[in-house]
Image (cartoon, helix red, strand yellow):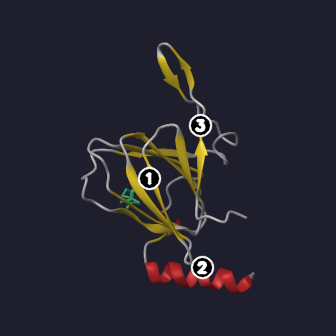
C-alpha cells in the first residue's frame, strides 16, 4: 500500500561527456505496459489542467523540460509535487484526482499511459469522483 497519493520514480541517467540519456521501458522503470505517450507544450503558464480522475488508467508524468506543480488527491489526502527534472516521473494511479498548475514558460510535460485515449474512462466531476472513492472505501 502506498501511504502517499502517487509516488516519484527516479530514472538513472546514463551520463558521459556528451550529455545524459534516460530510457523508459515498459514493466521496468515504467510500472505497466505502455500504450500511449502524449505531451503538453506551449502551455499558458496561468492555466490549470487535469481536473479529472481515471477509472482504470495508470500514468507516469515527467517534466522533460521546465516544471509544473501537480496536486494529487485520493479523496482523503492531497499531496503536492513539483515536477522539475527529466530524472524523475510521478506515478499517478487510477481513481486519483489530479490538477496541474504553475507551468514554467516553455515547459514540456510528457505523460506515459497504460492505455489508449478513452473519454469514458474519465471522471471530470469532482463530486462524482468523491462518491466513487467513498463507495470504494466502504467495500474494503
Ligand atoms: P484533457 O484530458 O482535458 O487534458 P488535461 O487533462 O491535460 O487538461 O484533454 C484535452 C483534449 O485532448 C480533450 O479534448 C481530449 C483530447 N485528448 C485526446 O484526444 N487524446 C489524448 O490522449 C488526451 C490525453 C487528450
Q: Which residue, given by chain and number where applicable, does mark 2 sit on? A: 133
Q: Is residue 59 left or right of residue 28?
A: left
Q: Which mark is residue 82?
A: 1
In three-dimensional space, the C-alpha distance between marks 3 and 2, rounded to whole angstroms, equals 31 Å
For label 3, being within 8 Å of ligand 1 is answered: no
**Residue 123 versus residue 16 in the image, above or below:** below
In three-dimensional space, the C-alpha distance between marks 1 and 3, rounded to whole angstroms, equals 16 Å
Marks 1, 2: nearer the viewer: 1
**Residue 60 versus residue 6 in the image, above or below:** above
Q: Nearer the viewer, residue 116 or 112?
A: 112
The residue at 64%/85% (across/down) is 135
- Quadrant housing residue 34: top right
Q: Earlier in the sequence, mark 1 or mark 2?
A: 1
Q: Residues within 10 Å of mark 1 (few under 14, many from 20)?
A: some
Indicate the position of residue 107 as horizontal and vertical percent values.
Answer: 33, 43
The reply to whether the C-beta atoms of the residues labelled 1 and 3 are less than 8 Å apart is: no
The residue at 60%/32% (across/down) is 12
Q: Which residue, given by chain and number where applicable, does mark 3 sit on? A: 11
In three-dimensional space, the C-alpha distance between marks 1 and 2, rounded to whole angstroms, equals 25 Å
Point out the quarter of the image occupied by ligand 1: bottom left
Indicate the position of residue 108 as horizontal and vertical percent values.
Answer: 37, 42
For the C terminus, the image quarter is bottom right
The residue at 47%/37% (across/down) is 86
Amino acid at each position: 500500500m502506498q501511504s502517499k497519493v502517487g509516488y516519484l520514480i527516479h530514472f538513472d541517467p546514463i551520463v558521459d561527456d556528451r550529455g545524459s540519456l534516460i530510457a523508459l521501458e515498459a514493466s521496468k522503470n515504467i510500472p505497466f505496459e505502455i500504450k500511449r505517450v502524449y505531451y503538453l507544450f506551449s502551455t499558458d503558464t496561468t492555466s490549470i489542467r487535469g481536473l479529472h480522475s481515471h477509472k482504470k488508467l495508470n500514468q507516469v508524468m515527467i517534466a522533460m523540460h521546465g516544471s509544473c506543480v501537480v496536486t494529487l488527491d485520493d479523496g482523503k489526502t492531497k499531496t503536492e509535487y513539483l515536477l522539475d527534472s527529466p530524472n524523475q516521473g510521478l506515478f499517478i494511479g487510477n481513481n486519483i484526482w489530479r490538477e496541474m498548475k504553475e507551468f514554467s514558460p516553455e515547459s514540456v510535460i510528457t505523460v506515459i499511459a497504460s492505455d489508449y485515449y478513452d473519454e469514458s474512462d474519465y471522471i471530470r466531476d469532482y463530486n462524482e469522483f468523491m462518491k466513487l472513492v467513498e463507495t470504494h472505501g466502504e467495500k474494503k
